[in-house]
């Protein structure tokens, strides 16, 4: 298990555990899975088993959480996650055109990763609560607003 | 109950307790509310929405299963508003449900089908694609058709809340939600079959009876669990004289609405290809079929010849069979009549009470403050009793467990001591002498001192001796010490013997030192029969290769016998025993008679199906044999049961502890083990699906890693175990919790061949 949960990763999971009462270790599942995904890129049954072991839960309860949220990936994906909002405000302001532009310039469809493993374009994103700056997208948990195709090219071009 | 409140239910004023859920009140008042996810034994999920009702003042329809009643609440369950909500829910549930009722085992007894008749529409308005779900393989007992699933999550909640180990979960969400195991894995619970009863649709069904019959063709016959001392109430469903399946009957004081998989699926043994269907006699090296007349003549001839005789009967035999068995053997001069085939210490035969008892009613276990369990993996031995113990532990009862290995409990024991059987007597003696018991000041920090103190302090304490303690080579000393400890601490002592009718076997006198009613008898016990081999043996439902303490030694004793007669339901392995005569007896579902459970509760059962071929009721066959040997059986009809009931409470119990000392060898690697869950009796061993189940698979040697290293087996996967000349190659499991002087090996398994004593000294070698 130690090659899945490094001491550093365990430390970050412990930080999640500290936020909840000691008898509610199950509350830290979501945080722990996020840390594991940040470290390894995506979740596997073995990685979820390691989390279950660490938190002292039945593995099946970790699978339930891991499979529920679309934020968790179960296949290898690109290093950077790009999510374009196409919900109503962004849609009215050209969000779908932004998505089409990205698909065209990267040569991939939503839900796929680029061949060089650089960018993962998430399949579909509902409202990310950035309506004031529509159209918007999220790159590795950072919001980018008032997008134009040029601005998008610049942001994506800067990703290593 | 909290404060009483008054609510109006469909215009009728009814009383309820504040905080009670509306659906529970309606159920009590006989007001039907449709539901799928709600189950009175499980937590409230409120996710099917079928139980929506109209509550005055509420803005929308309210789910009755999750709406607590408050004073003055006005509820309509049948108003147009309520019915519209219920019909809408049904329309949603039916969107993805396949119309495969004609090939679904649940058809005809399906909650969805029944409610759809009332609430469903004739025509579906849904014309888009329907979802299809792949079926997980949950093992040999539960079949899956997950496209039928409506996501009520009763099965998920059952595995977590009742079975105690969450094995099923809900994965994904919305349209993509699926019930399953996520990774391929069979169900491992001893109560897994209960999800079949709980599933309101045909998603989870009984795999052994899949597509065998339609629900409406089946006849149901109330019966009993015939494998453990709980005596679960159940119903056997039959079709044209064949057992198709088995379901629990609700009996709140025993099994509630649950049933162990062993009781549920053992009926398959009745159609095993090795069923013994007519009398067989040995003719040189062959079996020849003989008539009952000839078989009885031969048996009577052997039984009336002079010589030493011994009889061994299975503790799941009925009261009637037990009584007739000992009557026949004793009238024919047998001095050994026994049902405790796995026991090896018969000293102190009259120190035991007339019949073994739990010391407590099954439904009152949770009232105990402290329960001590010595020598049992209760999950395997008595699954429903373990469920009660788990309930008790969850409601605050302290459970202290002492075992030779750390078993996989489905609740956290308060304290668990994994202790070599060599130290059990020392532990009990230490407890007897501990400050709390001896009346001295000062606590003491050792396990024994702490436990003794808890027993002393507890108002309501219970001490259970399990099969590993009862079959221990020093069982009589353990019992005497435990009894002394219990008396001095005000603790009730209970025992957990094997079989469905051990109390009946004791009461009727199937014990070497005890006649009917527990009267002292001048008998010769099984262990003494090694020195004095009998000329004639009679086995009744006991397999001398799997159901005895030391198969190897018994085989040698049997070699000296002139005649061996077997009353069996299955043809025994000819390698293990040269029977002269085999007489067929009925098996589960085919037997009528009485069983006494470990509470002392008498329960009767009648045959659900006639037995195959020329199989005869066992007690009747014994009566005919009594007549053939020139004895009057007496007790015609119901008078036998009346006679046996009259025997209760007449035993003479002496307090004389056994004299001679410990017999368990001090040195050497000690083998220890009890039969695993589906190896405990011949019936389970012949039930196909149980033998394919996950719990039946493992037959391994469990040892401490240090013990492995000492034997040069540090990285080995297999080893050869040798005992009394028999050698067996088995897989190894390193278990750091094991005592260092022991190897755990489950018994009762035909794969073990004729290995010796279950508590014997063994050797380990490289495989």
Image: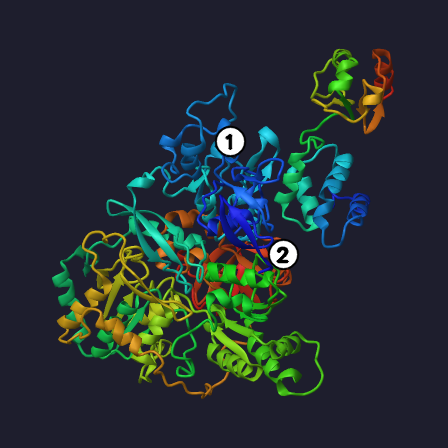
Which image quarter: residue B338?
A: bottom left
- Residue B687 picture location, percent across and down: 37, 51
Q: Mark 1 lies on which chain?
A: B
SS at circle 1: helix
SS at circle 2: loop
- Residue B602 picture location, percent across and down: 35, 68
Instruction: Name which residue lies at 81% across and 28% down.
Output: A140
Q: How many labels does the image show?
A: 2
Which image quarter: residue B549?
A: bottom left
Q: Nearer the viewer, residue B742 or B419?
A: B419
Instruction: Name which residue lies at 49% across and 21% down.
Output: B125
- In the rendered image, which residue does mark 1 sit on? B84
Instruction: Name which residue lies at 75% across and 54% down.
Output: A22
Please tell me if label 1 and label 2 are on a single chain.
Answer: yes
Q: In this view, does B513 lie to the left or right of A54?
A: left
Regarding residue B472, the answer to whether it shows in the image is no
Label 1 or label 2, whichever lies nearer to me, is 1
Which image quarter: residue B180?
A: top right
- In the rendered image, which residue does mark 2 sit on? B714
- Residue B208 picture location, percent across and down: 38, 43
Regarding residue B69, the answer to whether it shows in the image is yes
Q: Which chain carries label 2?
A: B
Q: Which of B72 and B224 is in front in this view?
A: B72
- Residue B741 picture location, percent across and down: 58, 68
Query: Alpha carbon of mark 1 to alpha carbon of mark 2: how far?
Result: 69 Å
């Amino acid at each position: 298990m130690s090659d899945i949960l490094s001491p550093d990763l365990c430390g970050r999971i412990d930080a999640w555990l500290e936020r909840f009462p000691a008898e509610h270790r199950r509350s830290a599942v979501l945080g722990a899975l996020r840390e594991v995904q940040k470290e390894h890129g995506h979740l596997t049954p073995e990685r979820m088993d390691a989390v279950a072991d660490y938190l002292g839960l039945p593995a099946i309860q970790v699978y339930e959480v891991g499979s529920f949220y679309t934020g968790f990936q179960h296949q290898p994906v690109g290093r950077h996650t790009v999510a374009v909002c196409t919900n109503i405000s962004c849609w009215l302001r050209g969000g779908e055109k932004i998505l089409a532009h990205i698909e065209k310039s990267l040569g991939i469809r939503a839900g796929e990763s680029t061949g060089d493993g650089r960018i993962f374009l998430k399949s579909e994103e509902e409202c990310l609560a950035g309506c004031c700056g529509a159209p918007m997208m999220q790159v590795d948990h950072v919001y980018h607003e008032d997008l134009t195709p040029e601005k998008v090219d610049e942001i994506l071009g800067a990703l290593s | 109950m909290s404060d009483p409140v008054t609510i109006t239910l469909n215009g009728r004023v009814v009383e309820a307790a504040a905080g009670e859920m509306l659906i529970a009140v309606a159920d009590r008042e006989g007001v039907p509310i449709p539901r799928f996810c709600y189950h009175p034994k499980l937590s409230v999920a409120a996710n099917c929405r079928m139980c929506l009702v109209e509550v005055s003042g509420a803005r929308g329809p309210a789910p009755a299963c999750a709406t607590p009643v408050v004073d003055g609440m006005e509820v309509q369950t049948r108003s147009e508003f309520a019915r519209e909500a219920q019909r809408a829910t049904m329309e949603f549930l039916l969107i993805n449900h396949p119309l495969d009722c004609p090939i679904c085992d649940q058809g005809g007894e399906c909650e969805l089908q029944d409610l759809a008749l009332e609430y469903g529409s004739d025509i579906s308005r849904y014309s888009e694609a329907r979802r299809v779900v792949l079926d997980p393989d949950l093992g040999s007992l539960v079949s899956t058709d997950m496209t039928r699933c409506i996501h009520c999550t009763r099965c998920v909640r059952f595995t977590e809340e009742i079975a105690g180990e969450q094995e099923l979960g809900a994965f994904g969400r919305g349209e993509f939600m699926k019930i399953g195991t996520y990774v391929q894995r069979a169900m491992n619970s001893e109560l897994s079959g209960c999800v079949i009863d709980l599933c309101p649709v045909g998603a989870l069904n009984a795999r052994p009876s899949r597509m065998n019959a339609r629900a409406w063709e089946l006849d149901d016959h109330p019966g009993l669990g015939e494998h453990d001392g709980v005596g679960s109430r159940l119903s056997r469903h039959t079709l044209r004289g064949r057992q198709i399946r088995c379901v629990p009957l609700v009996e709140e004081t025993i099994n509630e609405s649950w049933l162990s998989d062993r009781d549920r699926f053992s009926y398959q043994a009745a159609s095993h290809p090795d069923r013994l269907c007519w009398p067989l006699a040995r003719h040189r090296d062959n079996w020849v079929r003989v008539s009952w007349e000839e078989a009885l003549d031969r048996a009577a001839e052997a039984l009336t010849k002079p010589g030493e005789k011994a009889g061994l009967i299975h503790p799941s035999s009925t009261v009637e069979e037990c009584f007739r068995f000992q009557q026949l053997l004793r009238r024919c001069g047998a001095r050994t009549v026994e049902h405790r085939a796995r026991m090896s210490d018969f000293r102190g035969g009259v120190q035991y009470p007339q019949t073994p008892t739990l010391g407590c009613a099954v439904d009152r276990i949770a009232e105990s403050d402290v329960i001590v369990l010595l020598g049992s993996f209760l999950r395997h031995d008595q699954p429903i009793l373990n469920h009660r113990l788990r309930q008790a532990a969850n409601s605050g009862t302290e459970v202290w467990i002492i075992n030779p290995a750390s078993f996989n409990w489905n609740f956290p024991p308060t304290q668990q001591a994994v202790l070599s059987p060599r130290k059990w007597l020392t532990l009990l003696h230490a407890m007897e002498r501990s400050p709390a018991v001896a009346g001295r000041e000062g606590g003491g920090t050792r396990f024994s001192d702490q436990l003794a103190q808890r027993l002393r302090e507890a108002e309501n304490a219970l001490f259970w001796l399990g099969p590993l303690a009862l079959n221990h080579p020093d069982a009589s000393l353990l019992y005497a010490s435990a009894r002394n400890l219990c008396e001095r601490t005000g603790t009730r002592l209970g025992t957990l013997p094997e079989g469905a009718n051990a109390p009946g076997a004791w009461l009727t006198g199937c014990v070497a030192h005890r006649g009917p009613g527990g009267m002292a008898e001048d008998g010769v016990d099984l262990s003494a029969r090694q020195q004095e081999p009998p000329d004639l043996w009679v086995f009744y439902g006991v397999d001398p290769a799997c159901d005895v303490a030391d198969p190897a030694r018994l085989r040698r004793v049997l070699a000296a016998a002139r005649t061996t007669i077997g009353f069996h339901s299955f043809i025994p392995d000819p390698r293990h025993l040269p029977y002269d005569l085999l007489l067929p007896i009925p098996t589960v579902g085919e037997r009528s008679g009485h069983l006494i459970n470990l509470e002392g509760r008498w329960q009767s059962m009648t045959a659900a199906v006639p037995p195959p071929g020329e199989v005869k009721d066992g007690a009747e066959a014994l009566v005919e044999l009594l007549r053939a040997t020139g004895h009057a059986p007496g007790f015609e009809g119901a008078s036998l049961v009346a006679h046996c009931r009259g025997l209760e409470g007449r035993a003479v119990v002496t307090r004389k502890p056994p004299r001679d000392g410990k017999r368990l060898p001090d040195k050497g690697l000690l083998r220890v083990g009890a039969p695993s869950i589906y190896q405990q009796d011949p019936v389970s061993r012949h039930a196909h699906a149980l033998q394919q189940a996950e719990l039946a698979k493992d037959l391994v040697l469990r040892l401490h890693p240090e013990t492995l290293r000492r034997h040069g087996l540090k990285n080995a996967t297999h080893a050869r175990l040798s005992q009394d000349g028999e050698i067996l190659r088995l897989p190894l499991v390193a278990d750091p919790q094991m005592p260092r002087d022991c190897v755990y090996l489950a018994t009762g398994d035909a794969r073990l061949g004729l290995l010796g004593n279950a508590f014997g000294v063994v050797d380990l070698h490289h495989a």
